């Protein structure tokens, strides 16, 4: 009996040691990474609102890149996909599948889209173009594997970040003397009265390494629309793909490179006030060079933190949906009837007609939407994510009200909530301002996102 008690106590102490060792290990900041090619088949539809085109080639690889952080009770998986966006319900399904496979809470998984318009058709924004459900099934498999690999590769590491400027996004909402506003237009017209809102040239880059300083991943953030190859009929990651290739060449490794896009709802890669005449090839080189040069300049002088605070909070924000009026729906149906008869109508006429009819069909009996808003603390870096094409002013407001100066606001994350305009945008109307199925949220939604983000950020920094 005495021998049994001794053996029992030794065994208990052994398991106690293992338990405490495991607990101690979880307090070490760890980093895991992964990357997947997510190309679609040539011949299938490419995402684009006004131009129903099928891909004739793959210009460059579409990718999903991931970085995983863990420390203590917190885990966080951040994914950047070369896609235009994914619907809220599909995002929830993806998170569940990925979470189960990788043993991580689905709400600790953040799936962001770069918003390239050279990816598969995943949002129903064109009357003539279907959503590619077959591709969605393959994407689910790839992202599950991505999550498993990112978690499995976790190792002790350190991170550093810095910010500068790379002005690759400009406000694209022009206001006119009659009170109307349009997305894009000729600023030299006599009735042009100014741009509707601001832009945001801030460029922030984060670098993750192992404890020996070997680079594991690069994450960068800026605010613009990757639409250089819009309507070109090719699959392409646009400038984020070019940037990724250049960064990998400079560091000498095929590391995951994540692009997190900002509050870009009213932002264009083209400067409305100072247009440049250039080819697509010239434009992608100019823009990519700016991003790569700034990212690598920041990399030279990074101070790393091997024990950063890691925290995460989120709130599911319920907002109302605004419907088109009866005249909009009736006029929209007439346009769609003309299309059904074989008539070719202008792309914007088709977009606005279908958007109004589709919105009325989807939400007339369901007048609200739920927007997942997340706040992350990674050391002294603050990250806010939300699913909308948020107008730039809201992103600036969140930054201004943040408890720390190193703050980024990421859109198109955990789903697609459509355009989220300011009151000026709603009043000015037009595409990205008027109520259509991908500009459906109540007029106060952006302001509610700002308030929610502010509360979450201050909660993360109020308790240590």
Image: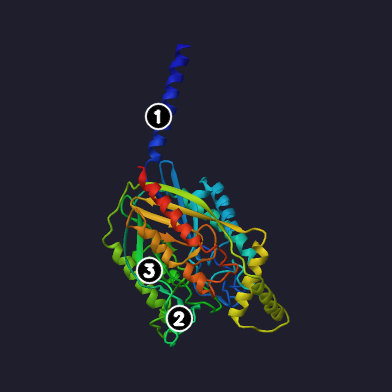
Residue 256 can be seen in this image? no
First reached walking from the N terminus: tag 3 or tag 1 = 1
Tell me where residue 118 appears, x and y as whole percent. 53, 72
Tell me where residue 174 appears, x and y as whole percent. 45, 78
Q: Residues within 10 Å of mark 1 (few under 14, many from 20)?
A: few
| Image side of residue 274 versus residue 238, left or right | left
Question: Secondary structure beneath disc 3?
Answer: loop
Q: Residues within 10 Å of mark 3 (few under 14, many from 20)?
A: many
| Pointer 2 with pointer 1, Cβ within 8 A | no
| Image side of residue 209 versus residue 241, left or right | left
- Please name the residue that numbered disc 2 is placed on: 280
Going by the picture, which residue comes out furthest to the front? 178
Tell me where residue 365 appears, x and y as whole percent. 67, 59
Going 35% across and 49% down the picture, which residue do you hit? 157
In this view, 17 is above or below 234: above
- Please name the residue that numbered disc 1 is placed on: 17
């Amino acid at each position: 009996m005495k021998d049994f008690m001794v053996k029992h106590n030794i065994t208990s102490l052994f398991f106690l040691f293992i338990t405490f060792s495991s607990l101690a290990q979880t307090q070490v900041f760890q980093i895991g990474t992964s990357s997947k090619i997510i190309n679609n088949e040539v011949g299938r539809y490419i995402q684009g609102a006004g131009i129903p085109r099928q891909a004739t080639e793959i210009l460059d690889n579409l990718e999903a890149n991931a970085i995983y952080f863990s420390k203590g009770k917190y885990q966080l998986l951040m994914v950047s996909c070369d896609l235009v966006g994914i619907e809220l319900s599909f995002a929830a399904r993806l998170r569940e599948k990925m979470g189960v496979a990788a043993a991580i809470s689905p709400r600790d998984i953040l799936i962001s889209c770069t918003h390239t318009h050279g990816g598969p058709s995943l949002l129903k924004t064109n009357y003539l173009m279907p959503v590619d459900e077959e591709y969605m099934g393959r994407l689910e498999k790839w992202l599950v594997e991505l999550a498993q690999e990112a978690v499995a590769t976790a190792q002790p590491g350190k991170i550093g970040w810095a910010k500068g400027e790379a002005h690759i996004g400009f406000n694209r909402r022009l206001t006119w003397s009659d009170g109307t506003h349009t997305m894009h237009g000729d600023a030299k017209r006599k009735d042009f009265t100014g741009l509707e809102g601001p832009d945001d040239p801030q460029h922030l880059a984060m670098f993750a390494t192992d404890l020996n300083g070997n680079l594991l991943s690069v994450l960068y953030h800026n605010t613009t629309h990757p639409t250089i190859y819009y309507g070109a009929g090719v699959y392409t990651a646009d400038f984020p793909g070019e940037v990724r290739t250049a960064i990998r060449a400079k560091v000498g490794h095929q590391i995951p490179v994540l692009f997190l896009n900002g509050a870009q709802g009213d932002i264009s890669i083209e400067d409305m006030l100072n247009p440049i005449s250039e080819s697509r090839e010239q434009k992608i080189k100019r823009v990519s060079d700016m991003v790569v040069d700034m990212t690598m300049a920041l990399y030279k002088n990074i101070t790393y933190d091997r024990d950063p605070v890691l925290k995460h909070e989120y709130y599911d924000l319920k907002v109302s949906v605004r419907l088109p009026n009866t005249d909009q729906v009736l006029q929209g149906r007439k346009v769609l009837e003309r299309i059904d008869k074989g008539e070719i109508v202008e792309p914007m006429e088709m977009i606005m007609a279908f958007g109004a009819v589709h919105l009325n069909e989807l939400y007339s009996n369901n007048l609200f939407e739920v927007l997942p808003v997340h706040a992350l603390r990674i050391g002294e870096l603050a990250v806010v994510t939300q699913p909308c094409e948020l107008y730039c002013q809201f992103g600036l407001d969140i930054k201004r009200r943040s408890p720390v100066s190193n703050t980024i606001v990421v859109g198109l994350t955990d789903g697609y909530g459509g355009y989220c305009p300011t009151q000026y945008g709603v009043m000015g109307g037009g595409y990205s301002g008027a109520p259509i199925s991908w500009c459906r949220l109540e007029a106060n939604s952006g302001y509610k996102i700002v308030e929610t983000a502010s509360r979450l950020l201050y909660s993360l920094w109020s308790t240590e």
